[in-house]
Amino acid sequence: MIRSALLTLAVSVISAATARAQTTCAAMSGFTAPDVKITAAAPLTDPVPLCKVEGVIGAEIRFAVWLPDAWNGKFVMGGQGGFAGAVDSQAIGYRGLQQGYAVAGTDTGHRADGIDGRWALGHPERVVNYAHAAIHRVTATAKTIVAARYGRPAGKAYFTGCSNGGRQALIEAQRYPDDFDAILAGAPAQDWRGLIATFLTITRSICGVSRPT
């Protein structure tokens, strides 16, 4: 009983000290970094009390960083499914925020709807961003935002993703091995010929054209 009470007291003291050390959410709107523009910083209460910082890197890599008040000292970047195209983080679906992680996500540098790939036509930079650059650039920016919010860098950094997020995980390990301490690659979408063929088949079906036999 005494040991449990002391442990609870210690956790409360540490949490209170961490909260006092945090930069206010409103002040995060003034965060600056090369080639980064912060567009919003607002407190939220769902799924936990946190500060959501949104911004743009370069011309059009949109991102968000969710910074829980009760931070566990770690950071996780989440992947995106399909062609991405909207700011998202699969780490949120894995309850990263409820576990105290600072979480980041991106649209990988373009806006898209479902499996429509017209965003890439005539835009080689978007293709590079989607392929690998956006995750790397958002990771670097998010780590800096985390340090600015909490007054210290994250002790550990992780990546988690499934499908296209799994592909992102593998490409991160290959191209940017220093970004993360550990990487979880779930069901990585690597067979691009097969995937594109599947997307085309689905599109033909949606448009009322019979599927090929």
Image (cartoon, rainbow, N blue to C red):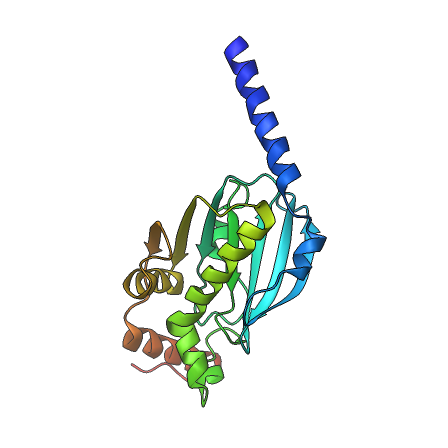
Q: Residue furthest bottom?
A: 122
Image coordinates of residue 98 in percent, x first then y, are 55, 41
Q: Quadrant of residue 159?
A: bottom left
Q: Residue furthest top?
A: 2
Q: Nearer the viewer, residue 195 or 173?
A: 173
How many numbered dots are placed on residues in this image? 0
Q: Say if 34 sits above or below 118 in the image.
A: above
Q: Residue at x 51, y 65 (%)?
A: 106
Image coordinates of residue 176 in percent, x first then y, are 33, 63
Q: Residue 79 vs residue 2: left or right? A: left
Q: Say if 207 sits above or below 138 in the image.
A: below
Q: Residue furthest right?
A: 26
Q: Residue at x 47, y 52 (%)?
A: 91
Q: Residue at x 66, y 37 (%)?
A: 20
* Residue 208 seen in the current view: no
Image coordinates of residue 50 in percent, x first then y, are 63, 47
Q: Quadrant of residue 22?
A: top right
Q: Residue 101 vs residue 179: left or right? A: right
Image coordinates of residue 210 in percent, x first then y, are 40, 83
Q: Residue at x 32, y 83 (%)?
A: 212
* Residue 174 seen in the current view: yes
Question: Which image quarter is the C terminus in?
Answer: bottom left
Q: Nearer the viewer, residue 38 or 47?
A: 38
